[in-house]
Each structure stands twice: as structure tokens, then as C-alpha cells.
Amino acid sequence: MTPIPTKEKPTYINITKSLLILFVLTALSCSTDTSNNGIPSEFEVTVNSTSVTNIEISWSESFDPEGDTISYSVYLENQEYSSHQNTRTYSFENLSISNDYEGFVIAHDPSGNERIADFSFTTTENLPPSNFEIILATPSNISIDVSWTEAIDPEGTIVSYDLYIDDTLIASNLSETSFLIENLNAATVYNLKIVAKDDIGNTTNLISNLETLDGIYQGDLSLRTQQAVNSFGELGYIEITGNLEMDGLAVFTDVTDLSPINSIKIVRGYFHINFMGTLTSLSGLGIEHVGQNFKISNNDGLNNLDGLDKLEEVFGTFQIEQNSNLQDISGINNLTTIGSTLAILNNINLITVTGFNNLNSVDSIWFQANWSLTQINAFSNVTALIGDLNLTSNTALTTLDGIDNIESIGRVFIKNTLLENFNALSSLSIVGGDFDIQDNSALQNVNGLATLTEITYGNLSFFYNTSLASLNGLENLNQLGGTINFVGNSNLSDFCALQDLMQNFSPGSSPSINNNSYNPSTTDIANGNCSN
């Protein structure tokens, strides 16, 4: 009987061992394989704030499946800005204004697994400061105190202010919202521009018209000291409704400078400067209009009238009297109107008077007792005087020019001068009242009176003109309302220029012809017995 074969052990044992080795290898393989380590969870990036150049982002937490700590890296425009940070916020600075950006945040686990979250944003435009407005503008004659609301910068930067008056910068980089605008003129409208600016130069403008006060001082004003002049000048008045008087008679005065009251343009009443002994100059005055008399007298420190170059109108008398050291009057060439008399009186050291070339309206012109006056060359624009031309006791006067456009005069008095002729009256045709020529020892002829045709109601009088020998020049005088007086002209021997006038002469009173070199009657003159 053949025995039944049995399984060999080794064979069993080898199979079992092989399975065991395969299991162990499989287990070992599973213990070292990372392919099953999970990646960080999804998360979102939030743009928290955007400004002109700064942006802040944050993101939600990303979780690791294995519970490991996650770190984060931040990229913007593919450039890494932060690597493996633990916090979940990041701020970008110094970006470009009004620009689009893209970026991403990477969540990292310790095994190098990653999750990416994208983000994008646009930086804002840098906006100018907000609109603002004037709260208060408080004017005086010479200033405006202005305040305004704050201009807010949308980006939160500090706003400063520049101020312009009539397009001229007067203040810059102000941090306050108020400013006192000074050195203005009264009764004037100014254009104010306030420029609010941020730190990069964006601006917002506020434009407004502001007006100073009218500058009118009500009533009379007396200024006798320099302090009074200075204090009043600081107020910036341009008009005085009453009188302006500067009078140092019997009081203390120390006035030397009138420039502080330069703003005064109009004095409705009179303007007197009298007995101001310390005043050596009128420079600085800005007076243009005087409603009544303008008088400068007894100011021994003045040697000229510089400072009256702006004077245009005096509706009373323009009087310059007894200023003992005054030597020159010139430059008063803006004066157009004198309502009454121009009177230059008793200025004993006055030598020359020139100018007044725009004066076209004046009633009378008087020069009296200016003993050193040698020359008058003025008034070239005057064509008529309804009052007097009175040149009396100007004992050194040799030159009279400038009045050769005057055609008519109310009365003429030329007395006690050194004039040699009357050529300055070459346009004179009518004298309304007396024509009186007296004590002019140097007068040699009257040829300059050739255009004189009429003395309406006054007398024709020549007294004590010791160098005058002839009346040649009066041939055209054909009307005489008064009488003739020729007395004491010790060399006068020729009256023939009056022959035609005497033909039908009917004097209002008895003529006087005596103490001349020849003394004819009016009949003699009419009949041609007029000279010897």
C-alpha cells in the first residue's frame, strides 16, 4: 500500500514568512509616506482700508489638518513683502496714487504644504482739502480781521493756508484759521483769496471781496503834537468832515513829520498849519481837496512847500503868509481850482514862485510884501480873473512870466516892484475896475499892454513910476469907465497913446495929471498936444 504523502513544513513556514515580511514592509512604507499630509484650509483676504499711498489688509485663519501652526507670506505684484509671518495683517506704504494692485497671501504648514488666497485693491486719488468759508470779517479803516472755517484734508494730513490780496501774497503756510490783514486803505474793496493746501500741494481756494470802512472822521480835528499826528495817522482816515487845524500858537508843539497823516485826502472845512515852529517840511501830506480856506502861516522852519504836489482843489482862499524862511514855492502843479484868492503874503525870504501850471480857475492872485521875491513864473493856464491881480510891495520883483494867457481881470494893482515892462500881460484886453500902476521905479515902458481895449468902470492910474517916459502901448484902449490919474511920474512926457481915448472922454471924476515931466490936460491930449 502506497502511503499518503504529507506537506512539507519548510514549505509552509516559507509561505508564512513571506506574508509577514510583505506586511511589515507595507506597514513601514505607510509610516513614512507624506502624500496623505493635508494642505492648509482655504482662507480669505480682506482689504481693510485704502488711502492715497497706504493700504492695510488682513485675512481669516487657515487651519492645518494635522493641527500644525500655519505661517503666512505676503506678495504684491509678485514681489514678496513678508515671509512666514505669524500675524494675519499687513500694511503697505508709499504706494502710487490712484493705481490698481494685485497680490496674494500664502499659508504655509511645517511640511511645506501651501494654500494661496488672492486679493486686489486700488489706491485712492489724493483729494484736495474740503471747501471752507469765511466766518467773520471785521474791518477798520486800514485793516480787516478775517477768520474762516477749517478745511479738512480727506487723507487726514495737516492743512495750511496762503493769503492773497489782489493777487499779491501777504501770508503763507498759516496753521491758524484767522489773520489780521493790515496796511490797507479806507473805503476800498479788496479781493481776498485764501488757498488751503495739503502736504503734497493739492489746493482748495476761497475767494471773497472785502471792504474797509469809509474812513470818514466826523467833525473838527486839531493836531498839535507829533504824538497826536502819529496816533491819528494810525487810524487811517481819508476824510475830515470839519476843519483840520495844526496850530502851535501859545501851546507846546514838536511836530516834525506829517507823513503819518498821508491817508487824509479830503478836508471839507478849512485846513490851517500855523505857528508850527518845528515843522521843516510838508513832505508826506496827501491832501487833495480842501472845502474852505487853505492857510500856511508863521511856520518859521519851512523853506519850501514840497508835499503839496497832490493838492487839486481849494474852494476857499489859498494863503501862504509870513513864513519867514520860505524861499521857494514850486511843484504845486496838480492844483486846478482855487475858489477865491491865491495869496502869497509877507514871506520876507521868498525868492521864486514857479508852477501852478494846471491852475485854471482862481478869482484873484495876490503877491504882497514878499521883499526878496525876484521871479514869478506861474499860472500859465489861467485865462481870466474875476477879482484882482495884485502885485504890491514885492520890492525885488524883476521877472513876471506865465500870466500872458490872461485875457480879462477884475482889477489890476502893480505897485512897488522892479518890473521894467508889462510883457507878461500881452493877452490882457479887459479890466473891469481900476488899473493902478504905482511906485515901479524900474518901469520903462508899457508896450506889453497893446491888447488892452477896455477898462469897464474903473480908473487908469499911474503914480510915481519914475523911469516911465511914454505911454506907448495903450493905443488900443478905447473905453474907460472912470478917470485918469497920472501923478509923480517924473520922466513921463508922452501921453499920445491916449489921444483916441480922449476924443470922447467923459470921466466919472476929475482927472489928475500933475508932477510928471509933462502935464497936459485931457483936451491937450485929445488935440494932439500930448508930448513935449
Image (cartoon, helix red, strand yellow):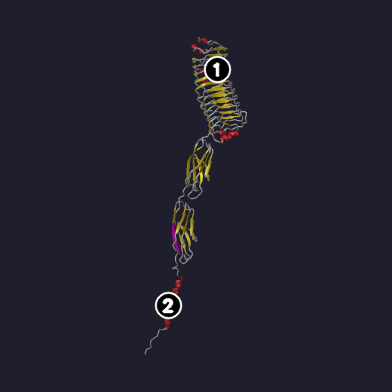
In what quadrant of the picture does the C terminus appear? top right
In what quadrant of the picture does the N terminus appear? bottom left
Task: Specify which label sits upstream in the sequence, 1 or 2.
Answer: 2
Q: Which mark is residue 437?
A: 1
Q: Nearer the viewer, residue 33 or 226?
A: 226
Residue 79 drawn at (x, y percent): 46, 57
Magenta residue span: 113-119
Q: Which mark is residue 274?
A: none
The residue lying at 56 percent from left, 35 percent from top is 233
Three-letter code, disc 2: Leu
Three-letter code, disc 1: Ile
Residue 80 drawn at (x, y percent): 47, 58
Residue 247 drawn at (x, y percent): 59, 29
Most frequent secondary structure within the magenta stretch: strand
Between the C-alphas of marks 1 and 2, the distance is: 165 Å
Q: Is residue 101 visible?
A: no
**Residue 190, relative to residue 5: is it above or below?**
above
Q: Residues within 10 Å of mark 2 (few under 14, many from 20)?
A: few
Q: For residue 252, which quarter of the picture?
A: top right
Q: Secondary structure at mark 2?
A: helix
Q: Which one is in front in this view, the residue at disc 1 or the one at disc 2?
A: 1
Give the residue pinned by disc 2. 19
- Is residue 418 magenta-colored? no
Q: Nearer the viewer, residue 192 or 333?
A: 192
